[in-house]
């Protein structure tokens, strides 16, 4: 379980944009996302969440579908 | 990287530096044969790396039978968990005069320097006991070495005539070799003037600058250095092997080299030369480091976590000091996450285990927030490296 970062994903938003799930998987430098079992969705790889570099690339890719929360603030 | 003496002598021989007759052997019987071939009294030197073996690794023998006995004893030496890498059997001519030469870098002037004495021994030791018998000349690492500098040095040793010419040739040859092979130190602790007037090197110690090992690969191959041979003074401990494994398994950033000491202050340290400074600072304030580490290149949270767990799991270590130079590439917040995570996974409270957290620089604001949440004080760059070390030593008691 991640201690410092939480990543919220709203797959109902991700699924609406073709290719967005793949893009999220691609842009994250520390592999926090993987393609979900449901088409065009993503899942969060919990083991990698604390490696989040807060680069914002995922939130830039989907401002409404992804939220990164610092648990220490 | 320390050369065995026989390797250093191979380099010297290749560059025309006069040496005494010698042979490297692997067994006592071979030592007897070598001594017989050389004739007369010989000296036998176990080829070892570990410090503290200087006296124990050298024996005299008056004849081949004595050489065999001496070699058998020398081959039993423990060289930091290894056996000696053979025995160097050498002729031991008596000379009219003995000199010593030392080539190294002067940290103050940032230049290579030659020191010489008309006594045998290590120049460092002679500087303490007979400073008036030492002469020095600096030279350039950028421009070709000039014979004039060598001649000037030899002249300072009160040499003249043919002695001056011969010594000049030797000093020049050694200086060029020192530069060519990126040596960090080259000590000729005994250079003897033989009866017929020639000089010959008896004892030599040489160290390669470790960062030059890739550039100097052809020379190292020629000498038979294995690719992974760093000439460590002892075999790595289980702690050090585990540290190296952690580092190798994750390419993100570094945490090594890791060395194990017998102290009680666990060190999670690094950044831009910070590790050496911090380790020295802890010692200066009377602390006893349990280890050395070198965080750099922005290690992952997981790497910092595993390093923390490794250090805290070391017997005798109850607390760790997390300290670094000012970081730019490495992120203070990621180090903080890894350290906190490692400690909590071991079932401890971070505030009980962290003596000090002084990692100033990139993302320090986030690091401070993380630490605050876990009740650990964050020290920024207003706390000097020395002060951070002092506080850590004071807290560990």
Image: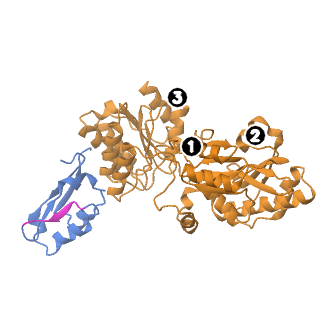
Can you name the residue that lies furthest to the front here? B65
Range of the magenta residues? A31-37
Tell me how far mark 2 sits from mark 1, CA to CA. Answer: 30 Å
**Chain A colour in the picture:** blue
The residue most toward the top is B397
Q: Residue at x 50, y 51 (%)?
A: B272
Residue depicted at 81% across the width and 62% down the height: B169
Q: Nearer the viewer, mark 2 or mark 3?
A: 2
The residue identified by callout 2 is B127
Q: Residues within 10 Å of mark 2 (few under 14, many from 20)?
A: some
Whether marks 2 and 1 lie on the same chain? yes
Front label number (3 vs 1): 1
Q: Nearer the viewer, residue B158 or A72?
A: B158
Q: CA distance from mark 3 to mark 1?
A: 37 Å
Q: CA distance from mark 2 to mark 3?
A: 27 Å
Crowding at label 1, few (<14), some or many (≥20) Cα neighbours within 10 Å? many
Task: Identify residue for label 3.
Answer: B286
Residue hosting label 1: B74
Q: Is residue B364 left or right of residue B62?
A: left
Q: Label 3 crowding class (10 Å Cα cut-off): few <14, some 14-19, many 20+? A: few
Q: Secondary structure at mark 2?
A: helix
Q: Are marks 2 and 3 on the same chain?
A: yes
């Amino acid at each position: 379980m991640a201690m410092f970062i939480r990543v919220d994903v709203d797959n109902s938003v991700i699924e609406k944009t073709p290719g967005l799930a793949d893009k999220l998987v691609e842009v994250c430098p520390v592999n926090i996302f993987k393609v979900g079992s449901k088409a065009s969705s993503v899942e969060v790889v919990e083991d990698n969440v604390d490696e989040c570099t807060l680069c914002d690339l995922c939130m830039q890719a989907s401002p409404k579908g992804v939220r990164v929360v610092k648990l220490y603030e | 990287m320390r050369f065995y003496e026989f390797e250093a002598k191979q380099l010297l021989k290749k560059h025309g530096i006069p040496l005494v007759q010698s042979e490297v052997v692997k067994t006592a019987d071979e030592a007897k044969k070598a001594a017989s071939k050389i004739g007369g009294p010989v000296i036998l030197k176990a080829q070892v790396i570990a410090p503290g073996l200087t006296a124990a690794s050298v024996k005299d023998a008056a004849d081949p039978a004595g050489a065999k006995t001496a070699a058998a004893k020398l081959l039993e030496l423990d060289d930091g968990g290894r056996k000696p890498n053979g025995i160097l059997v050498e002729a031991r001519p008596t000379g009219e005069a003995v000199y010593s030469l030392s080539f190294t870098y002067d940290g103050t002037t940032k230049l290579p320097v030659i020191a010489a004495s008309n006594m045998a021994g290590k120049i460092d030791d002679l500087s303490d006991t007979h400073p008036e018998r030492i002469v020095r000349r600096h030279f350039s690492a950028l421009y070709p070495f000039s014979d004039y500098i060598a001649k000037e040095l030899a002249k300072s040793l009160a040499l003249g005539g043919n002695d001056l010419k011969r010594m000049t040739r030797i000093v020049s040859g050694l200086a060029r070799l020192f530069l060519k092979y990126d040596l960090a130190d080259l000590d000729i602790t005994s250079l003897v003037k033989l009866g017929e007037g020639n000089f010959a090197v008896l004892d030599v110690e040489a160290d390669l600058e470790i960062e030059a090992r890739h550039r100097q690969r052809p020379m190292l191959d020629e000498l038979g250095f294995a690719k992974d041979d760093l000439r460590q003074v002892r075999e790595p401990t289980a702690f050090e092997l585990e540290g190296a494994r952690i580092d190798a398994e994750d390419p993100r950033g570094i945490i090594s080299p890791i060395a194990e000491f017998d102290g009680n202050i666990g060190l999670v340290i690094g950044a831009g030369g910070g590790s050496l400074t911090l380790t020295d600072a802890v010692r200066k304030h009377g602390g006893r480091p349990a280890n050395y580490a070198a965080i750099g290149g922005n290690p992952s949270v997981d790497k910092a976590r595993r390093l923390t767990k490794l250090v805290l799991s070391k017997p005798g270590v109850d607390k760790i000091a997390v300290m670094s130079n000012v970081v730019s590439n490495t992120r203070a917040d990621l180090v903080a996450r890894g350290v906190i995570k490692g400690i909590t996974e071991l079932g401890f409270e971070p505030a009980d285990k962290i003596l000090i957290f002084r990692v100033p620089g990139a993302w320090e604001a986030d690091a401070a927030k993380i630490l605050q949440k876990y009740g650990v004080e964050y020290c920024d760059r207003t706390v000097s490296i020395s002060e951070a070390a002092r506080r850590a030593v004071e807290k560990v008691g």
